[in-house]
Amino acid sequence: MRLSTRYGLTGIGALGLLAAVHQLRGMERSPHPTSDYLIGVLPNFAAAVAITFVLLSIWSDQNPEAGFASAKRPFLLCASVSGLGLLAWELFQKTSSRLVFDPNDVGATFVGVGVASILFFILRPRTPRGT
């Protein structure tokens, strides 16, 4: 499987999680502190992973011969765009009377970028032993 496909499927999976959480937010359910917390922060977590891998998939598709070593810098750029964009959105919410700033969302963004880093390492192309 091509690397751009792996990255794209990972981004789509994170977008699927984001859609599922938004669906759960709209459902009637009894209050529970743990599920309420997770439903509150999972959109930022999923968005951090999704943005990173959608951008990386685009880059990887344009650079099909790029290996793991040459993809590190683009990954860091994609993760930075994702993390800084989501953090900027959270800070923007402080200026609005209708939007709600949540420091837990900031933490979820950092965790999402961290998980994206782990996934980037896991999804790297396998090299034969001895080379």
Image: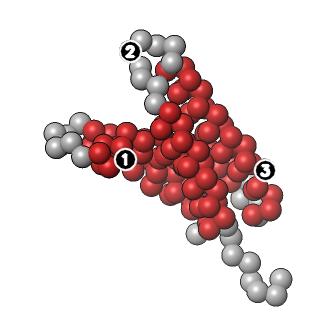
**Residue in the image at 54% along x and 37% along y:** 106
Sort mark 1 into few (<14), some (14-19) or many (20+) by Cα contacts within 10 Å: some
Using the image, tell me which numbered label, if any, was put on residue 98: 2
Say whether disc 3 or disc 2 marks the residue closer to the N-terminus: 3
Secondary structure category for the residue under label 3: helix
Relative placement, left or right, of 122 versus 37 is right
Whether tag 3 and tag 2 are in contact, CB under 8 A, the answer is: no
Q: Please, what is the three-letter code of the amino acid marked with disc 1?
A: Leu
Q: Give the image location of residue 97, x and y in percent.
A: 42, 12
* Gap in angstroms between the C-alphas marked 1 and 2: 22 Å
**Residue in the image at 52% along x and 57% along y:** 10
> Can residue 94 be seen in the rendering of this structure?
yes
Secondary structure category for the residue under label 1: helix
**Residue in the image at 46% along x and 51% along y:** 14
Relative to residue 12, is residue 36 depicted above or below? above
Whether tag 1 and tag 2 are in contact, CB under 8 A, the answer is: no
Q: Which sits in the foreground, 67 or 96?
A: 96
Relative to residue 61, is residue 48 depicted above or below? above
Q: Please, what is the three-letter code of the amino acid marked with disc 3?
A: Arg
Using the image, tell me which numbered label, if any, was put on residue 38: 1
Between disc 3 and disc 1, the foreground one is 1
Color scheme of the displayed model: secondary structure
Label count reads 3
> Can residue 19 be seen in the rendering of this structure?
no
Location of the C terminus (image quadrant): bottom right
Between disc 3 and disc 2, the foreground one is 2
Q: Give the image location of residue 105, x and y in percent.
A: 48, 37
Residue behind mark 3: 73
Sort mark 2 into few (<14), some (14-19) or many (20+) by Cα contacts within 10 Å: few
Q: Please, what is the three-letter code of the amino acid marked with disc 2?
A: Arg
In the rendered image, which quarter is residue 51 located in?
Answer: top right
Location of the N terminus (image quadrant): bottom right
